[in-house]
Amino acid sequence: MNGKLIYLVDKDEYIFITTINWQECQ
């Protein structure tokens, strides 16, 4: 969810945050 918020701030950060969340979900 945070990934979406970061996406608005920076595309690179969005990918970085999304990767972290993905691993956490796993």
Image (cartoon, rainbow, N blue to C red):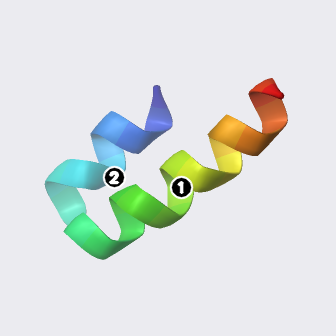
CB atoms at circles 1 and 2 under 8 Å apart? yes
Furthest-bottom residue in view?
A: 12
Residue 6 is situated, as x and y percent measured from the top left of the image, at 33, 52
Q: On the image, numbered disc 2 is attached to which residue?
A: 6
Quadrant occupied by the C terminus: top right
- Residue at point 16%, 51% (across, down): 8
Q: Amino acid at mark 2?
A: Ile
Say whether residue 10 is visible.
Answer: no
Per the rendering, the mark at residue 5 is: none
Q: Amino acid at mark 1?
A: Ile
- Helix, strand or loop for disc 1: helix
Per the rendering, the mark at residue 17 is: 1
When the figure is inspected, residue 10 is found, relative to residue 22, above or below; the finding is below
Say whether residue 4 is visible.
Answer: yes
21 horizontally vs 24: left or right:
left
25 horizontally vs 14: left or right:
right
Quadrant of residue 4 within the rendered picture: top left
- Helix, strand or loop for disc 2: helix
- Residue at point 40%, 60% (across, down): 15
Q: CA distance from mark 1 to mark 2?
A: 8 Å
When the figure is inspected, residue 10 is found, relative to residue 20, above or below; the finding is below
Q: How many marks?
A: 2
Residue 11 is situated, as x and y percent measured from the top left of the image, at 22, 66
